[in-house]
Image (tube, grey):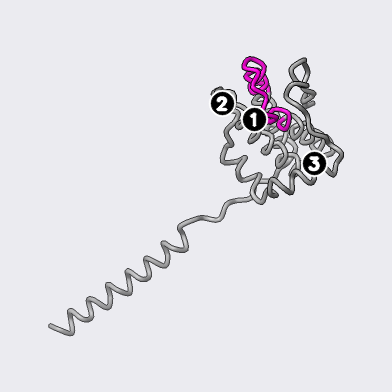
Amino acid sequence: MKHFILLLIVLLSISTLSFAQKKKQGDKPAATAIVADQPRTKNFLLKTNRFTGHTHRAVFNTKKFTGDLGQMVRYERYAKKLYEASNYQEAVYFSKRARQYGSVALAANSAIATSDGKFSAEEETITTGMPSDEELEKRITDSGSTPLTDESLMAGNLGLEIK
């Protein structure tokens, strides 16, 4: 009887250990890479452009100038330039950073973000491996892009149209 119980304990231990190893290996399935191709990038930028319009309206109405709207437009203009040069992966990185600036601007202006400010699962996958904020700032500065003020953007066209 002792041997039977001992055998039962050993078998349960082995099966539990085997299950735990399978569970550990299967916890996070590998993300399928989604390529930042032309249509996906265009949709990404268009969504950011709508969010930029919403953010612009909020800042225009409240007149709380933090500089974040200026950075948002600067980054999105650069994303547009990259898109037009068929550099889609870089374009989504800068467009994502633009949305992040927009969220900060909206919070400072006590405005509610639209769904365009959120990132879908596909967008998160496309921007996997995104460079740091500091690296993006270095790249945009090295490109010759200069910072914009929120006040300078109150008069009109933001120059973000995508064709």
Would residue 65 be counted in the magenta stretch? yes
User: What residue range appears in magenta?
Assistant: 53-72
Q: Amino acid at mark 1?
A: Gly
Q: Position of residue 17 (x, y in %)?
A: 36, 71
In this view, the residue in front, 130 or 147, is 147
Residue 54 screen position, x and y as percent: 63, 21
The residue where tag 3 is placed is: 140
Relative placement, left or right, of 3 versus 86 is: left
Q: CA distance from mark 1 to mark 2?
A: 9 Å
Percent position of residue 156, x then y: 77, 16
The amino acid type of the residue labelled 2 equals: Ala
Establish if 5 lies above or below 106. Answer: below
Q: Nearer the viewer, residue 16 or 51?
A: 51
The residue sitting at 18% across, 79% down in the picture is 5
Marks 3 and 1 close (CB-CB < 8 Å):
no
The residue singled out by tag 1 in the image is 102
Residue denoted by label 2: 113
Q: Are marks 1 and 2 in contact (CB under 8 Å)?
A: yes
